Image: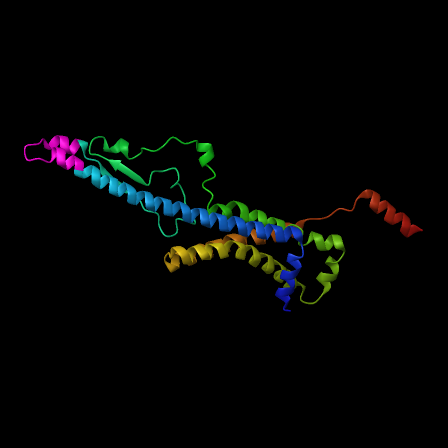
């Protein structure tokens, strides 16, 4: 077994760490599935609206498109369809497509005010954003990193192995392996569902690779910050325990 394999096995022995990783993987998979469902529904809605708009234009042309008809009425009653189809990466970051209209019928009268027509929404409910992969990355992945990193140093200090580990040759490599093992497991829990979505939706390669790179850098920042905070934590021995230890030593 390699050193990194041993570190991975050590992490998975913790029920809390294994549960957090599994939960993060499930949430990431659900977010990707939800984003794909949203984009597919929007594509289907755009197709239906296009068919309905074509029928509406035909009916207006039949009534007001006669040679002796009034051209002003035709321009007044004619609605022009505009739409914004979701991109291939919209499943990972839906943005405001759930609250802003992605199809809009406008006419020449009062065009400016029609551009801002949308449904009434509660701004507080819309503030966190939709549940998509970017939501899991920004809000939930740092929590998983904190769970895996918070006792990385303090746990060894509590067990009394910290000084021994620091005295071993190559101790710096040991901490780097532990950090890398936890970082890779969190990144895998996020990246595997996203990779499946990228294969299914087939966005441009550079766009998908850029999103994975941003996620890797974001997790690297939180992993380094978590290790720094964990290394600065100082555990205190309770006073009663210290008095008991001093009394037993004096005996």
For this view, does 161 lie left or right of residue 82? right
Residue at left offset 54%, top offset 55%: 189
Query: Would residue 4 be found to the left or right of residue 127 on screen?
Result: right
- Above or below — where is 148 with respect to 1? above
Image quadrant occupied by the N terminus: bottom right
Q: Is residue 8 above or below residue 148?
A: below
Q: Position of residue 160 (x, y in %)?
A: 76, 56
Nearer-the-camera pick, 212 or 35: 35
Q: Is 92 located above or below residue 80 in the figure?
A: below
Residue 225 in view (yes/no): no
- Quarter assignment of residue 177: bottom right
What is the x, y in percent for residue 26?
54, 50
Secondary structure of the magenta portion, mostly? helix
Residues shaded magenta: 59-76
| Residue closest to the eye, 116 or 226 | 116
Of the pair 84 and 143, the residue shown nearer to us: 84
Expressed as whole percent of the image width and height from the top left, the position of residue 121 reads 41, 32
- Single out the residue that lies furthest toward the bottom: 1
Residue at horizontal 90%, vertical 52%?
A: 249
Residue extending furthest toward the right: 251
Residue 210 on image: x %, y %: 42, 56
Tell me, yes or no, whether the highlighted magenta stretch contains residue 67: yes
């Amino acid at each position: 077994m390699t050193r990194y394999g041993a570190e991975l096995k050590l992490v998975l022995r913790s029920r809390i760490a294994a549960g957090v990783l599994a939960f993060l993987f499930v949430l990431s998979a659900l977010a990707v599935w939800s984003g794909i469902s949203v984009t597919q529904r929007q594509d289907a809605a755009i197709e239906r609206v296009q068919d309905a708009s074509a029928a509406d234009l035909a009916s207006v042309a039949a009534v007001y498109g006669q040679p002796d008809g009034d051209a002003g009425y035709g321009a007044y009653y004619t609605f022009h369809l505009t739409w914004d189809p979701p991109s291939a990466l919209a499943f990972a970051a839906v943005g405001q497509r759930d609250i802003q209209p992605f199809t809009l019928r406008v006419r020449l009268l009062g065009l400016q005010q029609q551009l801002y027509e949308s449904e009434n929404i509660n701004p507080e409910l819309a503030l966190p954003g939709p549940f998509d992969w970017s939501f899991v990355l920004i809000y939930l992945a740092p929590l998983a990193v904190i769970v895996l990193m918070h006792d990385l140093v303090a746990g060894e200090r509590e067990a009394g192995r910290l000084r021994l580990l620091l005295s071993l040759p190559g101790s710096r490599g040991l901490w780097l392996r532990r950090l890398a093992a936890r970082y890779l497991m969190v990144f895998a829990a996020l990246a595997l569902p996203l990779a499946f979505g990228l294969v299914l939706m087939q966005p441009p390669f550079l766009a998908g690779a850029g999103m994975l790179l941003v996620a890797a850098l974001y997790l690297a920042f939180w992993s380094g910050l978590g290790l720094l905070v964990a290394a600065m934590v100082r555990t205190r021995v309770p006073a009663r325990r210290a008095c008991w230890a001093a009394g037993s030593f004096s005996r």
